[in-house]
Amino acid sequence: MSKYDSSFMREALVVAQEAYDNLEVPVGCVFVLNNDTIIARGRNKPNESYNATRHAEIEAIDIILKQYDRSVFENVDLYVTVEPCVMCASALRQIGIRHVYFGCGNDKFGGNGSVFNINTELDTNQSKGYPSEGGYFHEEAILMLRKFYIRENKHAPVPRKKSNRVLKTEIIPNTSK
């Protein structure tokens, strides 16, 4: 049975900061076995790897599958700073993740409720869905993303000048958590 533990979300934020420090979109995650043991950490690496699929969740899943059988995911929860995108939500469903806890929603590409409900939709392959809850450390996750998006991104196909942008620090409170 899954139960939320804020210390794991704090650790996901630490990993997201590592992504930010490496000029990546600051998304970080930890996979937790049996509510008490981190078995993998992942951060975004698309810029570093020149591979758009190297999201935090995928990075960590690869680490886990080198050490464990896929069945381990029945007892694993994911703590991630941003709602999984469509690709990651689908991957999490396919591996059979037990539960997902996330920070802020993903209003453009969210796969766990913001745009699509991949985690709960009926599936022709009969794969089991998974519960997902958001809003944990919502403000911290949003602020980290805002800090990233106001700075220059030398990896962008057509970099935009952002010298006139200002960091908005006011965040509408998330009343769900």
Image: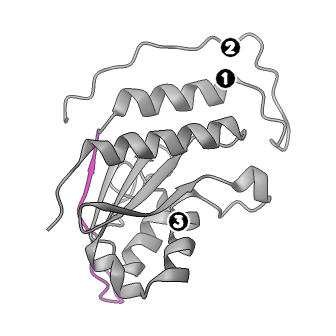
Measure the C-alpha gap from mark 2 to mark 3.
Answer: 33 Å
Residue 121 percent location from the top left of the image: 29, 70
In the picture provided, is 41 more to the left or to the right than 158? left
Q: Residue at x 27, y 70 (%)?
A: 98
Q: What is the quadrant of the N terminus in the image?
A: bottom left
Crowding around mark 1 (Cα neighbors within 10 Å: few <14, some 14 to 19, many 20+) is some
* Disc 2 target residue: 165
Residue 173 percent location from the top left of the image: 28, 22
In the picture provided, is 92 more to the left or to the right than 51? left
In the picture as drawn, the residue positioned furthest to the left comes out as 1
Sequence-first tag of 2 and 3 = 3
Sequence-first tag of 2 and 1 = 1
Crowding around mark 2 (Cα neighbors within 10 Å: few <14, some 14 to 19, many 20+) is few
Q: Amino acid at mark 2?
A: Arg
Q: Residue at x 68, y 54 (%)?
A: 45
* Disc 3 target residue: 60
140 shown above or below 95:
above
94 shown above or below 40:
below
In the structure shown, which secondary structural element does the residue marked by tag 2 occupy? loop
Residue span colored magenta: 120-135
Q: Circles 2 and 1: CB distance less than 8 Å? A: yes
In the picture provided, is 54 more to the left or to the right than 51? left
In the structure shown, which secondary structural element does the residue marked by tag 1 occupy? helix
* Disc 1 target residue: 150
Residue 125 visible? yes
